[in-house]
Amino acid sequence: MKKSLLALAVLSTVAGAALAQSSITIYGLIDMGIDYDNGKTGSTATGSTSKWSVGSGQTSGNRLGFKGSEDLGNGLSAIFTLETGFNADDGTLGNNGRLFGRQSWVGLNGKFGSVKFGRQYSSTYLALQIVDPFSTSSAADGQRVYGYGLGKIDPIARSDNTVTYQTPDLSGFTGLAGYGFGEQAGSFNKLSTKFLGLNYVNGPLTVLGVYQNTDGVAFSPSSTPTAQLDAIVIASGLAPTTTTSATVKNTLIGGTYDFGVAKLHAGFGTTKAQAVGDLKVRNYLLGATIPFGQGTVLASWNRDNVTDVQKGVSDQLGVGYTYPLSKRTNLYVIASYTKNQDGVRMNSWANGKSDFEGQFGVRHTF
């Protein structure tokens, strides 16, 4: 009996130590509200048609995630993240129906940095999250403007079959390198994604630069385009029914500086889509995050200049306010206005048409 009790005590101690060295966190976010848009839909016969809707994931994509780590000793740990996106307005899966369409990776972390394998964010996506006051969501975010909207398109935002290496913090510098395998027989490069990123953080200052080269970005236009991808195809001179793919090369440099009374944001980017004909885009961003009362004011200006298209400039102005009800819940109101020259239709249903979009909602994390 004593031996059994002793064995049980030893096993309990070992199990307790093992559990103490491992951790798994279940987390999530639900963002819902009302969206009004007066310019995304329309027809030549009737003109633009305004639309009211229940917006899901307006300022942050709705998600349910699992992340964890296991201490392997000597400063080495195993890490993973599985994150699914969903549409809270109707309960369907987001990210084109993928179970873990937001993130799905496993890796190792240590003094050398970290190595990860799986579906991951690209350096472009991570940079826009930092540079843009509105991050990568909402009616005013720069991701839907960057590269004439290509910033929201996989694999420029998220990359499948990807291996990444991130350096440890080296006196304020961190680097990121990633390669997404195209997994095509007979070709190492076909449908692949390559990206690099470098960040420098020193107190209130953040400076960054990224580069990405993506092969085989699909262009599937329609006769009445509503997606940014459709618009860029037609702007480049392709027929509305043409289905093709392009190699997209994009860069972004920018940064933020926090003065305390306000944080300033700035960025400059270029995008080149090589398909039937080349399409070159330049992007400019200026913004501010300003504490006001218990909440925060957000403001930004984004310019998209399709340099190969006559009268190809679009300007997006955005303003918003977030108000915390608790550490995990906040209310928000956001508005954006897009002005297009005659050669382009950023965020709008037809060339030269403007667009206004307003959002109100509640965001809760758990």
Image (cartoon, helix red, strand yellow):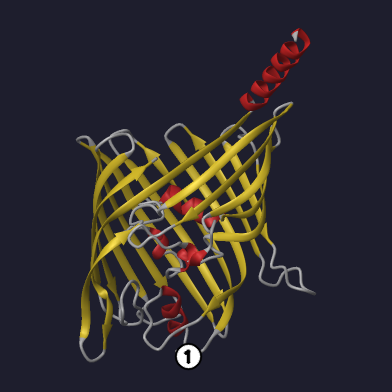
Residue at x 58% of width, y 79% of height: 245
Q: Position of residue 137 (x, y in %)?
A: 38, 56
Instruction: Identify the residue under disc 1.
Output: 241
Counting from the top left corner in percent of width and height, residue 177 is at 65, 51
Q: Residue at x 64, y 40 (%)?
A: 79
**Of residues 338 and 18, which is closer to you in this image?**
18
Who is closer to the viewer here, 343 or 98? 98
Q: Residue at x 32, y 33 (%)?
A: 260
Q: Secondary structure at mark 1?
A: loop
Count of picture labels: 1
Which image quadrant for residue 283? bottom left
Q: Nearer the viewer, residue 64 or 339?
A: 64
Residue type, numbered disc 1: Thr
Residue name at image x 46 percent, y 56 percent: 85
Looking at the picture, does residue 113 appear above or below residue 318? above
Residue 328 in the image: x percent, y percent?
Answer: 34, 38
Q: Residue furthest top?
A: 2
Q: Quadrant of residue 316?
A: bottom left
User: Can residue 51 be seen from the camera position used here?
Assistant: yes
Q: Is residue 24 above or below residue 148?
A: above
- Number of residues whose C-alpha sits closer than 10 Å to that of mark 1, classed few (under 14), some (14–19) or many (20 or more): few
